Image (cartoon, grey):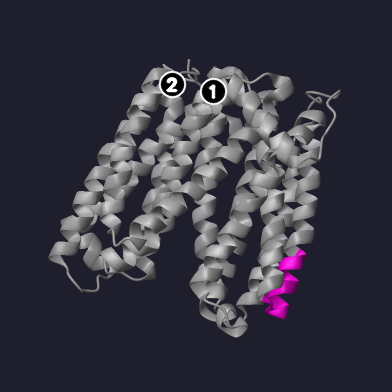
Amino acid sequence: MLKSQFSLLRERRFLPLFATQALGAFNDNLFKNALVILITFRLAADAGVDAGLMVTAAAGVFILPFFLFSATAGQLADHYDKARLIRLVKQVEILLMLGAGLGFYLDNLYFLLCVLFLMGSQSAFFGPLKYSILPDHLADDELIAGNGLIQAATFVAILLGTLAGGLLILTGSGGILISLMVVAIAVAGWLTARAIPATRAAAPQLRVSMNFVAETWRIVSHAAAARDVFLPTLAVSWFWLVGATFLAQMPNLGRQVLGGDELLVTLLLLAFSVGIGVGSMLCNRLLRGALRTTFVPLGALGITLFSLDLYLSSTAFLLHHPATTSTVTQFVGEWRGGRVLLDLFLIALAGGVYIVPLNALIQARSNPAHRARNIAAVNVLNALFMVLSAVASAIWLGMGGTLPGLFLLLALANIAAVLFTARLR
């Protein structure tokens, strides 16, 4: 009989990790979006630099550590007790959040960018730990449920952190409030991490190399040599390219195409985040805990079809509402607006159905002694594909391409993912 995946939330072998990850995702995005808003509205002007350029630089500063440190992080996670390392990483987060508070107090752009780089580094070290520890505490038939819960909570935490950072930072005491929050949440994450059960070292004989260039090449090459691990890895990285494109363009979709304000952008983000959560949670019921890719091609097909309809629905909305401003009530009250919202929800739902089994397969198929390094290779490729997403979007839009046109290109390109994942079966 299929167990409810929510029963894992009553288990010490899962709940502390679940809470630690959710708190960390919230905190990352609380700080990142507060900094982006601050750069946009004040810090860039004070420093005499272009705001758009600095926001782009901030995104690069956060993602760079995934290229630099993922290989080292994977080695450490395989060499030591993962639970102990998670607690150490969370202690570092507390120190970094105290540094963030100092940066907000000093109102110093470059100091805050340094903190952002260190936060990206902390996330890079946490990445292989949070996914490679799951098979240590969960049975194979629980991996779909565990990954689904973590995926759902992560996207909801990203949404809430993004909204809180944007809404609070420009208030009268925004810097102080954000500083207190990020430190408090970091402490809460450390406390929950203390309850994560210990694990055995997967590869205690491993010699950890600090040559990140050589080790990055080595872990990616090792993953590539194992076809049953590398093919799902490529499929996961494609998901992050697609997801990064939608998330990055959501403000432009809400403002430039749909003529809305910040509330409408928030509504679009909410629909997308809830869709990912619903799709992720649906996987356990569809697969009944079995580690199969049965529904992954259908998820990819859903992304293609609903992205295509998003192109049509957003174009139709733009044609019928040229140069007008839409309130949330007006947008939701019209069927064209509801269609756009439904498309975003269904794209994300299909994405959740797509990504969860792939993550679980990578975990289950990896040699336990090399599992964290395989996860680190996934993180490196995810970061690479997200950079490719940003570059491709910038080229398309810079050449005069429309945002709905970008969604059309994404829908057509994703047909390759449908065919690719069909072969994984």
Mark positioned earlier in the residue sequence (2 or 1)? 2
| Range covered by the magenta-colored residues | 98-108
- Residue placed most toward the observer, 342 or 383: 383
Is 130 displayed left or right of 93 in the figure?
left
Q: Are marks 2 and 1 in contact (CB under 8 Å)?
A: yes
Q: Which residue is mark 2?
A: 293
Residue 221's x, y, as percent? 63, 27
- Residue placed most toward the observer, 70 or 133: 70
Q: Quadrant of residue 304?
A: top left
Identity of the residue drawn at 59% across and 79% down: 43
- Residue placed most toward the observer, 393 or 411: 393
User: Can see residue 398?
Assistant: yes
Mark 1 secondary-structure assignment: helix
Type of secondary structure dominating the magenta stretch = helix
Is 83 displayed left or right of 65 in the figure?
right
- Does residue 398 show up magenta in the picture? no
Whole-angstrom CA distance, mark 2 to mark 1, is 8 Å
The amino acid marked with disc number 2 is: Thr
Identity of the residue drawn at 80% across and 31% down: 198
Q: Which residue is mark 1?
A: 361
Quarter of the image containing the C terminus? Answer: top left
Identity of the residue drawn at 59% across and 63% down: 58
- Does residue 107 show up magenta in the picture? yes
